[in-house]
Amino acid sequence: MQRRTLLQAPLATAIAAPALAQGGAARTLRVVPQANLTSLDPVWTTAVVTRNHAFLVYDQLCAQDAQGEIKPQMVEGWVREEDGLAWTFTLRPGLRFHDGEPVRAQDCVASIRRWARRDPFAQVLWPAVAEVAALDDRRFRFRLHKPVPLLLLALGQTQFPCFVMPERIANTDAFQQIRDAIGSGPFRFVPGEWNPGQRAVWTKFDNYVPRQEPVDGLAGGRVPRLDRVEWTIISDPATAANAMVTGEQDYWEYPLHDLLPLLRRNREVVVQQRLLDGTYGICRFNQLQPPFNNLGVRRAVAMAVDQRDYLRAVAGNERDGWEACEGVFTCGTALANEAGSEILKTRNIDRARAALKEAGYAGEKVVLVAPGDYPQINALSLVTADLLTRMGMNLELVSTDWGTLVQRRVSKEPVERGGWSIIHTTSSGQSLALPVFHLFLRANGDNAWFGWPNDPEIERLRAAWIDSPDLPTQKRVAEALNRRAMEVLPYIPLGFYWQPSAWRRNVTGAFRAPATVFWNMAKG
Amino acid sequence: MFAYVVRRVLATIPVMAIVALFVFSLLYLAPGDPAAVIAGDQATPQDVERIRASLGLDRPYLVRFGSWVWDILHGDMGVSIFTNLPVTTMIQQRIEPTLSLMILTLILAVSIAVPMGVLAAWKQGTIIDRAVMAFAVLGFSVPVFVVGYLLAYVFALELDWLPVQGYTAFSNGFFPWLENLILPAIALGGVYIALIARITRATMLEVLGQDYIRTARAKGAGQGSILFLHALKNAAVPIVTVIGIGIALLIGGAVVTESVFAIPGLGRLTVDAILRRDYPVIQGVVLLFSFVYVLVNLLIDLVYTLFDPRIRY
């Protein structure tokens, strides 16, 4: 007996709703997203799940293709003045917001201003911006104090994208959450069906005008081929896997690595890598407090690290599931290099022990905070805990939840007063590809990311990279940055793992991109 | 009786006030910062501080507590820090699945456990009695999530009779509603059935040894009449008490069951809110659960009078 006949047969003719649902199901993509969609504002929060929602609803002025190049998206193109002190952008004709209003240059200007208040990359460039203003309904212009070669990259980046909203919404303070998700993207958000923690729904925007080029990363034609995209929040990975196997769901964004073999065994389920970049592991020291204010102790730990142990703990033994990457820049990108990375190739616990002794480690307590509700970061944390124990360090492993960790990591106090010594996190490859995005490579003391490394030389090199006129110069600076980072160790890179997605075989049109997006996809 | 009910209803006010103070203080003292979660990794400490200020989290404890109590007294439970939706709206969205699950579990558990307990007492010392007791031990011992996964594996994955996850509103039809809830209700009901069956058996054994039962038998009353009319009615007070106390078990178990079966109920709302430190939502849901628990206990006190006319308020 099949499911439909067990309980519903007695009323099959009387209940019309299931029949209707079946008709719509063919054009509805049922998705298990990576997390619960709790906020609709991609400027207010950096949550990746909100960014994924924003890619459905909003459009970008320009966007990254599969090679990382910036291509026009909402704009027809741009003109850069010869002296580099002005850029004029022209919008494509016919663009409309979901409320029916036309997209105007004034909307773009307001959206750029709001986004620039929160995006760290834009904040680096903003002192060079004299003005951004609308010239008419279709053109807006940046006037600059000095040439900013990275302007296009900032506007078209995927890490913290500049999404365009109506001016009346974009005028909201960047630190206040917007309430209306009205964009000009290929799908429109259905607020009436949003039940945070259960469901979020988008429907096709019939008036969307896609570009004519084929899809290429996030660039090219963003053609909506589905009538509805429905996200169902399933917090339990085993239940999500079961729902994929039974066909109750069509697409699972981030299947747990442990469950991939189960999914791969099912002929109706496809498991493939969609994201262009891997996810990188980060081990971060608190450099304000002992013992990791001692460079020798940090270097000793680095000598014990073998990235493969970490990656196996997270992504298992499948060799194509992860790769070591013993430099600070994203492997496979233009700046990737291993200059000075020999310390990460030591991988020897005995030498690490000797180095620890030589550094003068006197048994100071090390507090490693691990988030038990975050499987990947927890696995990274436990491997480090094991290493430190084997090195003979005085370790206290604090297992807590992510919410507590993000508060505790703010503390600069000694461990006896609620501080910490080591935390772990993960980062997308995009975020580590360039010095200007690279959060963990900042070494500006109190203003650096938690752990607060202070190294003027790293900061000098970073500034030099931003001003580098061409790629060869940028590469030379990147090598110097890697060498310096391996000397002073603002963090230890732990390699990267691939995060595949899973979808039912009748889902077509999935393509590789820097973010999870649903245009061009269909369901047969 | 009426005066008693009024007195009990009024007595819930200080109870709820203490719960409110306790919940608010606990959350205030607990570690975690929603502003840091919202701001993400890229934010500067100044950004986090600005978000904290915009959410009103930088205000002193007493000011925040006073403002929250004032709003509650005006029927306003506040707005979720993350979703920007009113807490009352979020609770309304989630209350039906949880109530459905609890009611179905309650009906299922009582209709299975009471006859099981009566049967075990009647057949004391036989294999039936031992089987019922073995089931009760199993029900107590196996965690809800294990039962849930096993049921999902057998009835959803292997047999494909029932869905693995989700919830269909009652308004979409009784059978679709039941289809989604039957496995979660069985999983959640295991402990509850075990508890009620054991209490029923123990109370029935005591009652069946009373003189009036012997008199009933001597009068020629049938076995069914003795068990269900004479004995069970007199054994009902402890059973009803346990059913009431068990509501707390159901509330706790619903959190796990809703996660295993992806039911969008209040249990999952609570867990999600706790993990994100969404204070207004946590406070609202805990207050609601406390109120329900106080109310259920009041109802049980009133139900006693139906079973035992000697009880007067």
Image (cartoon, coloured by chain):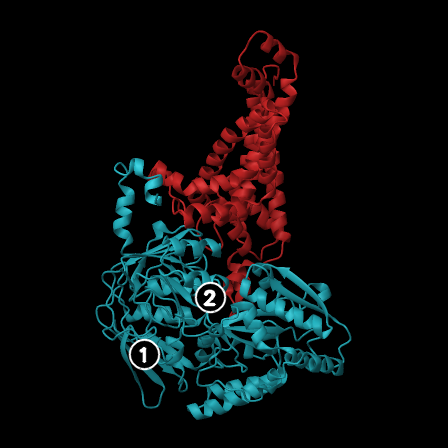
Chain colours: A cyan, B red
Q: Mark 1: give few (<14), some (14-19) or many (20+) Cα within 10 Å.
A: many
Q: Residue at x 52, y 43 (%)?
A: B254
Q: Earlier in the sequence, mark 1 or mark 2?
A: 2
Q: Residue at x 35, y 43 (%)?
A: A1
Q: What chain does mark 1 sit on? A: A
Q: Is residue B93 above or below residue B49?
A: above
Residue A372 appears in view:
yes
Q: Is residue B175 above or below residue B263?
A: above
Residue A14, given in percent of the width and then of the height, sits at 26, 36
**Residue type at numbered disc 1:** Lys
**SS at circle 2:** loop
Residue B11 appears in view:
no
Place residue B196 in its image quadrant. top right
Q: Quadrant of the N terminus of chain B?
A: top right
Q: Is residue A57 above or below residue A157?
A: above
Q: Residue furthest front?
A: B127
Q: Which residue is mark 2?
A: A46
Q: Which residue is mark 1?
A: A71
Q: Residue furthest right?
A: A362
Q: Residue at x 66, y 67 (%)?
A: A368
Residue A482, given in percent of the width and then of the height, sits at 55, 86
Place residue A224 in its image quadrant. bottom left
Residue A294, given in percent of the width and then of the height, sits at 70, 79
**SS at circle 1:** strand
How many marks are shown on the rendered structure? 2
Q: Residue furthest top?
A: B219
**Residue type at numbered disc 2:** Thr
Judge left or right: residue B107 versus residue A92. right
Question: Which of A23/B255 is in front?
Answer: A23
